[in-house]
């Protein structure tokens, strides 16, 4: 780390108060942006999506679990993978603590992957997670929400992700989060989806790192999350080499 400027206490307070004014402006701007997000138009969901769950087959309506709002995290775990995406796993380490609180605000939280349920459950047990995680295997759910691509789409050189065509990605899966609302008549509406760096807001550990002197300390890495491992693979242990998922060599899956 480069030598840093050191000042008197009074000079430190003056600099901190000046920065505090900017932080407050950012907080107000973020609140205003959140209001605009909630004011975005909705689209009605007419397709009958069905998921494999520990409770049997469930529809998208079932995933609401008695709530009117549903947040789905699209986790990168494809059929045949022996481990989930390390970056998605980094996000998922935050989910259990949040889900119980979301339920108190009329929000259900569910994770969805395209892998079969048995493969999801095996990885979930390894990681020690408790959140609800269901399989969209065999349905159109993942491609309809821009998080899975066919071999033909990948072979074409570009895929549609984050509302634009981008250079193809090493994996057939991508991360994202989608939000839905169900009214009293049982109609379901898609209200919001976010991808790439839009998922940063879900990563509490990043917000802690942003407070630290070195910040995220990722500038010299090959891609932003190159340092991330499954939480049981730190302390010098290698990431499971058997997984069919490969991190991109030039950018994070969450750029």
Image (cartoon, helix red, strand yellow):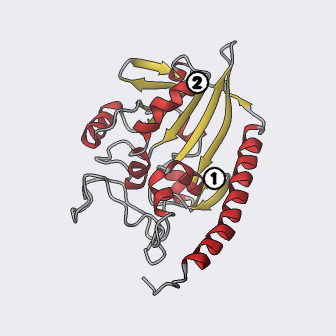
Residue 44 is tagged as: none
Which corner quadrant of the image does residue 183 belong to? Answer: top right
| Residue 88 in view, yes or no | yes
Residue sitting at x 49%, y 31%:
101
Observer-nearest of 29 and 223 = 29
Residue 162 is tagged as: 1
| Residue 138 in view, yes or no | no
Residue sitting at x 66%, y 61%:
23
Q: Is residue 98 above or below residue 18?
A: above
25 to the left or right of 130: right
Marks 2/1: CA–CA distance: 27 Å
27 to the left or right of 202: right
2 vs 1, front mark: 2
The quarter of the rendered structure image containing the C terminus is bottom right
Q: Secondary structure at mark 1?
A: loop
255 to the left or right of 116: right
Position of residue 144 measured from the top left corner of the image (x, y, whole percent) = 60, 39
Q: Which residue is mark 2?
A: 106
Position of residue 234 measured from the top left corner of the image (x, y, whole percent) = 26, 60
Query: Residue farthest to the top?
Result: 185
The quarter of the rendered structure image containing the N terminus is bottom left
Q: Is residue 168 above or below residue 125?
A: below
Q: Is residue 39 above or below residue 241?
A: above
């Amino acid at each position: 780390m480069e030598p840093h400027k050191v000042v008197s206490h009074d000079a430190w307070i003056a600099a901190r108060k000046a920065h505090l004014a900017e932080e407050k402006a950012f907080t107000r701007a973020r609140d205003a942006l959140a209001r605009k997000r909630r004011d975005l138009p909705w689209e009605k969901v007419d397709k009958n999506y069905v998921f494999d769950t520990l409770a049997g087959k469930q529809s998208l309506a079932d995933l609401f679990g008695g709530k009117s709002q549903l947040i789905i995290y699209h986790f990168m775990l494809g059929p045949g993978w022996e481990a989930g995406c390390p970056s998605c796993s980094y996000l998922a380490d935050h989910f259990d603590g949040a889900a119980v609180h979301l339920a108190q605000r009329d929000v259900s939280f569910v994770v969805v992957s395209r892998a079969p349920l048995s493969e999801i459950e095996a990885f979930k047990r390894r990681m020690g997670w408790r959140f609800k995680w269901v399989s969209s295997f065999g349905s159109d759910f993942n491609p309809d929400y821009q998080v899975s691509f066919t071999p033909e789409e990948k072979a074409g050189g570009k895929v549609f992700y984050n509302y634009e065509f981008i250079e193809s990605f090493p994996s057939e899966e991508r991360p994202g989060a989608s939000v839905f609302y169900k009214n009293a008549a049982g109609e379901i509406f898609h209200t919001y989806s976010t991808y790439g760096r839009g998922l940063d807001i879900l990563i509490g550990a990043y917000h802690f790192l942003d407070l630290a002197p070195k910040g995220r300390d990722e500038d010299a890495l090959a891609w932003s999350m190159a340092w991330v491992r499954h939480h049981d693979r730190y302390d010098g242990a290698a990431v499971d080499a058997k997984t069919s998922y490969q991190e991109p060599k030039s950018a994070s899956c969450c750029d």
